[in-house]
Amino acid sequence: MKLLVTGSAGFIGSNLVEYLLTTFDDIEIISVDKLDYSGHKINLKNLPGGINSDRHKLIVGSICDPELIEQIAGEGIDGIINVAAHTHVDRAYYYPGLFIENNIEGPLNLLNAVEKHKIGRMLQVSTDEVYGATTPDKPFDETAPLRPGNYYASSKAAADLYISAAVNSKKIDAVVIRGTNNYGPRQYPEKLIPFFTRRIVQGKQIPIYGDGEQLRDWLHVKDFCRAIWTVFTKGVAGEIYNAGASNHVSNKELSLKMLGILDADPQLIKHVDDRPGHDVCYAIDSTKITDLGWSPVADFETGLRETVMWFKDNREWIETIKEKSDANPVNHEFFANHYKNRL
Ligand SMILES: NC(=O)c1ccc[n+]([C@@H]2O[C@H](COP(=O)([O-])OP(=O)(O)OC[C@H]3O[C@@H](n4cnc5c(N)ncnc54)[C@H](O)[C@@H]3O)[C@@H](O)[C@H]2O)c1
């Protein structure tokens, strides 16, 4: 089977490509990533056979480029897994246009290729954030209304709606998976776990938004990769599947766990101005995907410890990512604007 996997040089994409190539012998992958600020070739360096081999080829380019996607689709692929997106809620406040372009126009471009080249199936990786906030005792199933609370979530919700419209009106085969907060190796260091790990290791304060009571359901990236593959291979055409770990931890509790793992002073916690419109809790019902035979296996305490130690110990990765980040003026602008009164 030959697949197009997009966003392969990012956090989830690189873990997915690694999972597929190391688990199945009969999968060949063309991966497309535009190596935006969070995408890096170093994330693919441990693939069996290296970044480019007889089973994997990285093409540096955008899913928003119709000619590129047309060319890849025209050469013959059996399916598309779209992982590419802009993913940071805080950046979406400052650069909403990037989220419209990459998270909505990009998937639409892929859908056009699926239709034109009669590609077997497309899977869109989406997020629990499209449902908006709830409480753990009132999890949303896949029929819940979409009430995104920030521009990242609204761009993901829009893409999901384009998928269902394409399934309905173009009669193509597409499925959507909505995952909860992922954690694991190679996550870009603007996200909570790698960001806080780095600051704790440096003895710096960690900025917790508001009271830190926001609840997130933490899903190990390896479990999410298995979930993606389960939906790609067993999901019913046109359907949406939630995937969560029912593992709710508040941001403050998570920070305290990380401080404990790194044997650091809890006084490093600094409460700062909350994110505007910060959703207090995301919670989803994953019954539908468990009916396909998937369930998460990672133990959160073990997975968190391994993840924190991965970020602490992988100096080569951190320095490589930092070098690219330091050279990016937009990163400086975002950090200066967003954290000016918070750090
Ligand atoms: N991280 C999470 O907790 C989480 C949870 C649920 C769903 N998701 C979804 O999973 C996907 C991946 O998230 P992530 O955390 O790995 O993000 P990430 O930022 O680490 O990776 C995104 C990758 O996409 C690439 N990319 C962005 N725009 C592109 C474009 N137009 N063309 C080609 N490549 C492009 C980037 O270069 C990067 O390599 C996203 O769709 C996100 O919405 C993430």
Image (cartoon, rainbow, N blue to C red):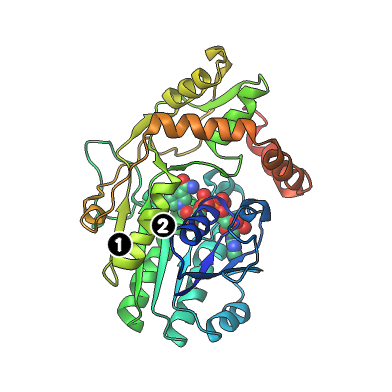
Residue 203 drawn at (x, y percent): 66, 19
- The amino acid marked with disc number 2 is Ser
**Residue type at the position of mark 1:** Ile
Q: Is residue 23 visible?
A: yes
Tell me the residue that label 1 is attached to: 240
Tell me: residue 104, above or below residue 301.
below
Mark 2 lies within 8 Å of ligand 1 (Cβ measured): yes
Which of the 4 quarters of the picture holds residue 337?
top right
Taking the image as shown, residue 46 lies to the left or right of residue 159, namely right
Q: Residue 90 at x, y = what percent?
A: 56, 43
Residue depicted at x 43% and y 65%: 159
**Nearer to the camera, 233 or 87:** 233
Left or right for 204, reference 85: right
Q: Residues within 10 Å of mark 1 (few under 14, many from 20)?
A: many
Which label number is shown at residue 325? none
| Residue 126, numbered circle | 2
Q: Residues within 10 Å of mark 2 (few under 14, many from 20)?
A: many
Quadrant position of residue 115: bottom left
- Above or below — where is 263 with respect to 94? above
- Secondary structure beneath label 2: strand
Pick the quarter of the image with the N terminus: bottom left
Residues marked 1 and 2 touching at CB (< 8 Å): yes
Q: CA distance from mark 1 to mark 2?
A: 9 Å
Identify the residue at image location x=21%, y=51%.
287
N-terminal-most mark, 1 or 2: 2
> Does the Cβ of the disc 1 residue fall within 8 Å of ligand 1?
no
Residue 86 in view here: no
Residue 174 rendering spot, x and y as whole percentages: 36, 72
Element at badge 1? Answer: strand
Q: Is residue 247 above or below residue 262?
A: below
- As drawn, which residue projects farthest toward the right? 327
